[in-house]
Structure formats: structure tokens, C-alpha cells
Amino acid sequence: MQPHIASERLITTLRNKGITDERVFEAFRKVPRHLFVNSPMAYEDTALPIGQGQTISQPYIVALMTELLNLNEKDLKILEIGTGSGFQTAILAQFSRRVYTIERHRELGEQSRLRLRGMGYENVIFKVGDGTCGWPQWSPFDRIIVTAGAPVTPDTLAEQLAVGGTMVIPAGDRTVQDLTVYKKTETGLESRTACKVVFVPLIGQHGWND
Ligand code: SAM
């Protein structure tokens, strides 16, 4: 099947599962998933292995997290923890002034940097390191997205969220997490749980032990 036909079929699946934001679908049309994962199942709604024991996230979860981030302005500064294949990064890059993305596995971070550079993305800054510490040098961020499961939400990340900003993070135990949405106000953090999710663990100083 031609990638663009497979992509439209995937978008229909996402719609049927409850994604409604047309801008998210538009971003999916611009980011061909088969360029991020070498698999005949690239357009199936499933997570797939990308090496180092890690996965490219399920498209529904990428779409849901993007929708929950409420990317309603063009000039956003976004921090992403867990670059992985760079697929979510590329989706975020459609909506923002700049995406700062951190991956702890050097091979994955480097591959994704080369991939996105090759695809012409110039508004993404890559770092290899422990994303649980955030990236204080560039904070505060309008949006923060964590694509690995944390035991609890790291204070370090909450501190680096701008007032008026939104953070989406899976937090819970190693097997299942609550996909949690934080909104930072002048008086503190408001939170709500969107749904249960299953992510690979967030490993680091303010996450799980290796
Ligand atoms: N969103 C990615 C994609 O679409 O390909 C998938 C991310 S994968 C589910 C989670 C990633 O988080 C893995 O690549 C893992 O190595 C990374 N990770 C885990 N702990 C991390 C940490 N403390 N800092 C940065 N990356 C981390």
C-alpha cells in the first residue's frame, strides 16, 4: 500500500478512537512514519521496536499527547523528554518555534538528529543526557512532554514549565501509568488524568533506577 494511503487509513483509525484535532491529523500527514521505523507495520496503530530495548510510541498515543498539549499558538517553546525515533519530535516541530528534545541513549539521539536534519527540520535542538533534569538553560518551556513512564512527576520539570504552560507525562508504576496533564497557573499546578497508558520507564536521577 502507498504510504499516503496507509497514512490516511491510520488517521481514520485515530479519528475513530476519539482524536478530533484536525491540526494533529495535518501534522501526521506531513510526517511519514515509515521514515522513522523500518517495519511493514509502520502505519499500524501500534508501538514498534527501534533498538536499545526502546519503542516508537503507538500513533494513537502520539496523537493524544499532542492534542492534550493544546498547541494553540505558533510561537511555542517545547521540551520533549525521550526523543526515541524522533517521530513525536517531528510532529511537535510542526507546531512550535523550537523543540528541545533529550534522549538518554546516544545511538537513538544521534540517529534521530541525523534523520530530522536530513528531512529539513531546523527548529529542533537535540541533546543526549538525562531528561529528568530538564534543560534549565532554555527554561521556562511553554509545553513539556515526557514520552517515558515516570514513578512520579519530577519537580525539576514542573519548575521548568512556564506559567500558563502545559505538561503531559505518564506517571505511575513500571507496568501502567496515568497519563497526567498539568497546567501551571500563578498559584501552582493543576492536574488531571487523561487515561491509563503503558510506557517504557523513564530512567534517571528523578526517574527510575537503571
Ligand atoms: N516518542 C518516541 C517516538 O515516537 O519514537 C518514543 C519514545 S520511547 C517510548 C521513550 C524514550 O525515552 C526511549 O527512547 C528512552 O531511551 C527515553 N528515555 C528514558 N529515560 C530517559 C531520560 N531520563 N532522559 C531522556 N530520555 C529517556
Image: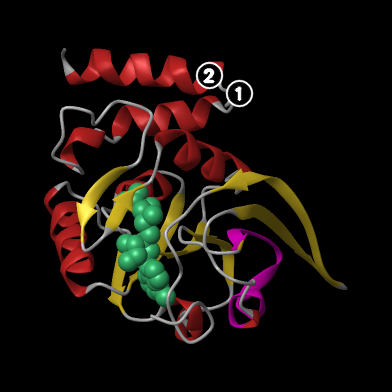
Q: How many marks?
A: 2
Marks 1 and 2, how far apart at CA: 5 Å
Q: Amino acid at mark 1?
A: Gly
Q: Secondary structure at mark 2?
A: helix
Asked if the residue at label 1 sits under 8 Å from ligand 1, the reply is: no
Question: Cβ(mark 2) to ligand 1 < 8 Å?
Answer: no
Which numbered disc covers residue 18?
1
Residue 189 x/y as whole percent: 79, 68
Q: Label 1's element? A: loop
| Residue 180: in magenta span | no
Q: Look at the image and say whether residue 160 sits in the magenta stretch.
A: yes
What's the residue at 55%, 38% (across, down)?
64
The image position of residue 152, as x and y in percent, is 64, 72
Q: Residue at x 16, y 14 (%)?
A: 2
Q: Taking the image as four quarters, which one is ligand 1 found in?
A: bottom left
- Residue contact between numbered discs 1 and 2, judged by CB atoms under 8 Å: yes
In this rendering, does residue 65 appear at all?
yes
Badge 2 is on which residue? 15
In what quadrant of the picture does the N terminus appear? Answer: top left
State the quadrant of the C terminus.
Answer: bottom left
Position of residue 149 measured from the top left corner of the image (x, y, whole percent): 51, 62
Question: Would you call the spot at circle 2 few (<14 residues within 10 Å), some (14-19), or many (20 or more)?
Answer: some
On the image, which quarter does residue 114 sit in?
bottom left
